[in-house]
Image (tube, helix red, strand yellow):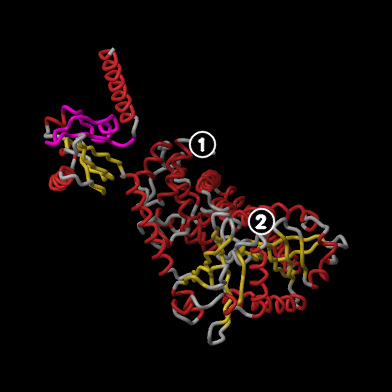
Amino acid sequence: MKKNSHGTKRNRSEEMLVFIGKAMDSSNDAIGLSDSQGHHVYHNKAFTDLFEYTPDELETLGGGLAVYADPDIARKVFNAIMIGKSWRGEIEMISKSGRKFPVNLRADSIKDENGKIIGLIGVHTDITEQKTMEEKLRKSEANYKQLFDNSPAAIYQVDYKSGKFLKANDAFCKYVGCSQEEITSLSPYDILTEESKKLFLERVGKISQGIKVPEIVEFDALDRKGKRWCFQLHIKNIYDAEGHVIAADVVAHDITERKRAEELLRQSEEKYRLLADHMKDQVWLMDLNLKVTYISPSVEKLLGYNLEELKQLSIDKLLTETSLQPAMELFSVELSKALPTSQPSSIKHLVELEFCCKNGQTLWGECSFSFIRDENGKPLSILGEGRDITERKRAEDKLQQIIESLEKAVGATIQVLVSVLEARDPYTAGHQSRVTNLAYAIATEMGIDKEKIEGIRMAGSIHDIGKLSIPAEILTKPTKLTDIEFSLIKVHSQTGYDMLKNVGSPWSLAQIVHQHHERMNGSGYPRNLKVDEILMEARILAVADVVEAMASHRPYRASLGIEKALEEIEKNKGVLYDESVVNACLKLFREKDYELT
């Protein structure tokens, strides 16, 4: 029976050891055991995970002291434990891979039943994450303090129970006119104006009743010298464990100047409205949906609609069909620019719009628009300003009719000259026609404006008009010209200019004819002009003239062919001929299959 009893006790002891071992292995703390000589005898799984050593590896390295980053500290801990003392504190450890990290160490001696120290136990808690968080908290608190102390914005903290300031930065104390030590003896009630005191007490009363109040408010305050300030307060409440508001952090923005500006603006708007009501030019306001919200009396007088009637009208009823589309495009573009920005902006250029009057008539207005914005720069409405230009438009229409009549007269005159030249020299007339068509195509390819293209067409059709003064036998001579004969030919540019210089025309016909034999390097005739001294119309005509002349039959030689002509202008572009003109001409023939006709 005794043997069986002993065996049962032994089994229970073994079971207890297994239980203790499992309990230690389930611990999140790294637990290590050493004997009285410092030899490492056991550690749990958390120890292996933390320090990366097996028990055998630690024994090879001299025991558990190998995981201490500082050997001197390791010896001090071991010596203290071996004389019966406990060790508590933070120690830096080192893992097998060389990673150093802080732990909370709880080390104690292990004694037998007689009190003899037979080993030691160390419980290590990795506090790396805790230390990291503490460092972040330290930096955060340091940053907060720096921000609080040095912020240009006025910041303070107020206690709702005592009603006193708990603390304030220098910026706020400067507004109040006291030191940081003095501010804690004051409450917001002490510095507010009478009107703001009522608002403050009302706010505190609501907070005490648990009523939600706005986080952004405006209060007026007085400093110790009686100077008035206006603050916009951004308030964040501080709550206790039960959820009651006990204090508040407040950032106070000085909006004194803004308030003064708003008052000045209000006064200015009153003056502006008075001015708008009595000015002759038209002034109106529209919302961002282009609905009229205000008109000056001059608008009502001009259009015949009163404000209430205009409010009911959409913009398509106020503008004629021809003016509606450009107006809508203008507002669409300008609104897309104005809405995302808080910067002041206006529609800089003037726009001419035709309005529909109540009586069915129409009138023209020269208008400009700008955006009216709130204090945050957000567009609120559109200000329109205009003046009646109906009479000016009628005068312009009449002038245009005169110009068109003049153009017809010039065209008829030119046609007469072309007919005279054609009757005398059909070859020259055909040459002029082909040059005109090519010059017109080059100018179009270059994107020249329509008015200049029309001038090029007119000038091209008579560019050799000066040849009327040259004897026909020279013009049609089938052999090479003598130097004297060629000199006579060259005079045709000057003669053409003399014939056209007194002809009234919207275009510089005489100058274009005069310059069509000039060259970019000054080697042309009759005036040896260079580069910018030569009109662009004349540069275009020069290239067309050379290409047609070389590609066409002459009385004294056969055609040289279009390729020879193109080689000539390509070889001399930028030297004799304008580079952009040559490029346009080459593109016509080589890419767009242009043919001389």
Q: Give the x, y percent position of residue 18.
A: 30, 23
Q: Give the x, y percent position of residue 96.
A: 19, 35
The amino acid marked with disc number 2 is Phe
Q: Is the residue 283 above or below the residue 123 in the image?
A: below
The amino acid marked with disc number 1 is Glu
In which quadrant is the N terminus drawn?
A: top left
Residue ranking furthest to the front: 1
Disc 1 secondary structure class: loop
Query: Is 177 colored magenta in this rendering?
Result: no
State the residue position of label 2. Answer: 331
Q: Which residues are magenta?
A: 28-56
First in sequence, mark 1 or 2: give its number: 2
Query: Is 39 colored magenta in this rendering?
Result: yes
- Asked whether the viewer can see residue 428, the reply is no
- Give the left or right position of residue 118, taking residue 535 as reference: left
In this view of the protein, which residue sits in the foreground, 142 or 509? Answer: 142
State the residue position of label 1. Answer: 595
